[in-house]
Image (cartoon, grey):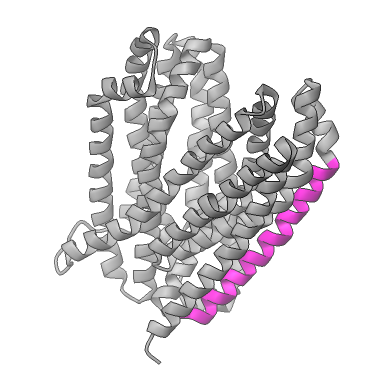
Amino acid sequence: MNTSLIKEQGLGKTLFQMTWPMLFGVLALMSYQLVDAAWIAILGIDPLAALGFTLPVHQIIIGLQIGLGIATTAIISRTLGAGNPERAKQQGGLILVIGTSLLALLSLAVWFSRHLILNFLGADESLKSIIESYWLPWLLSAWLGAVVYLGYSQHRANGDTRFTGLMMVLVSSLNLILDPLFIFTFGWGLNGAAWATVAAFSVGGFFTFPRLRKRNLISLNFINLNRLAEVRGLFAMAGPAALSQLMPAVAALLATGLVASFGVAAVAAWGLGARLEMFSLVIVLALTMSLPPLLGRFAGAKDWQAIEALIRIAVRFIIIWQLAIAIIWLALSKPLTQLLTKDVEVSTLVMDYLLKLPFSYSGLGVCILMVSASNALGLPLRALIISIFRLFVCYLPFLWAGAYLGGINSLFTGALVGNLLAGILAWQMYQQGLKHLRLQTPA
């Protein structure tokens, strides 16, 4: 996949061909996570609570995992775009070694400090033995999943999203099949869920890494490679990207705390709305995986005109698509809320949520895409600033203002305004970043 062939085939067509496999991959991943939690819920309240104490720590590992994945795609795709495939192979090998080691160190640090972490999180003594027993296979599964994700990122950086999407579907499907077997048939309980994930990701790694070597996409021969400079470049990209992945979790905690002040029904409605939002944005998440390799290629080739055209195609599609999704939610709001909950108060609030927030997902989608695009273009600090502005300048202040002025219903309106404003600001900040890159390029 080179820039000339991409433009010859058509930017829109290429973007579509790279996005649809990721769409199925993201849907499979979401489905596996929901069903996994449902199986664990059958075991009772204690295993479910143990899973709850695991999630904050898992978010830290996932933050580093995604940060490294973003850096992998951005660095390798830009090197390929600059016409240096041999260096791209060396970069791929170096990133894989460093990433695997860092993720292993983080997992070991979590294990050896587990008592401190559980005390800090306020875990009951009755739960600690369950959590500690679960964390050993869970940390192994988290490390394996993160390492396999780095392998996926290597494939995406080289333009192969079909294999990545296929593996995400395969691993998620295998996990769904093994979960009831390991949890109930073998009688391993909560630990069985973790061992099922270990087995699924092991199969994913078995296919992913030999394929990298077979296609000659990585090299462990670092002769003539400035390793120190490459490591600095990796951390300069991965650090801000990882931090930007952790901030939504912080913002979600603050938002939930604000919503909780309006009662249990408000929290229940907010939680249901958040789950619907996740599925509403699935195409945006797929684009954040398929678009960066293309942008990186054109950035490496200094083809800013193609970048601008590609981004405009993606943004126009997101705006139209998300508005269509909003109209669908509007039409289905009443029967959907009746299906999701029988509580009249919760149902009323969910309907109000669906009447307002989906119409802001176009702005939210543009903002998420601009963060991804900025990372791909080698502007990680700008991506981090966009994330900060979205959450702590637009979203949370307008959420608070809405709650202060008119209660829970106005809080939904505040979220709508905040998301739309975030999209506008993100677009402007991306344009400024692209202009800066253009000025740096010799005529």
Q: Would residue 43 be counted in the magenta stretch?
A: no
Q: Residue at x 36, y 41 (%)?
A: 146
Q: Give the vertical position of 228 relative to 47 (above or below).
A: below
Q: Residue at x 64, y 46 (%)?
A: 401
Q: How many marks?
A: 0
Q: Nearer the viewer, residue 29 or 442?
A: 442
Q: Would residue 313 be counted in the magenta stretch?
A: yes
Quadrant occupied by the C terminus = bottom left
Residue 4 shows up from this direction:
yes
Residue 352 sits in quarter = top right
Residue 151 shows up from this direction:
no
Q: What is the x, y in percent for residue 198?
A: 38, 28
Residue 149 sits in quarter = top left
Q: Give the vertical position of 297 relative to 290 (above or below).
A: below
Q: Residue at x 81, y 50 (%)?
A: 327
Q: Give the vertical position of 357 relative to 373 (above or below).
A: above
Q: Nearer the viewer, residue 202 or 145?
A: 145
Q: Main secondary structure of the magenta part?
A: helix
Left or right placement of residue 415 versus residue 223 in this view:
right
Which residue is situated farthest in the bottom direction here? Answer: 443
Q: What is the x, y in percent for residue 428?
A: 56, 70
Q: Give the vertical position of 396 relative to 12 (above or below).
A: above
Magenta residues (range)? 303-331
Q: Residue at x 17, y 67 (%)?
A: 226
Q: What is the x, y in percent for residue 91?
A: 27, 61
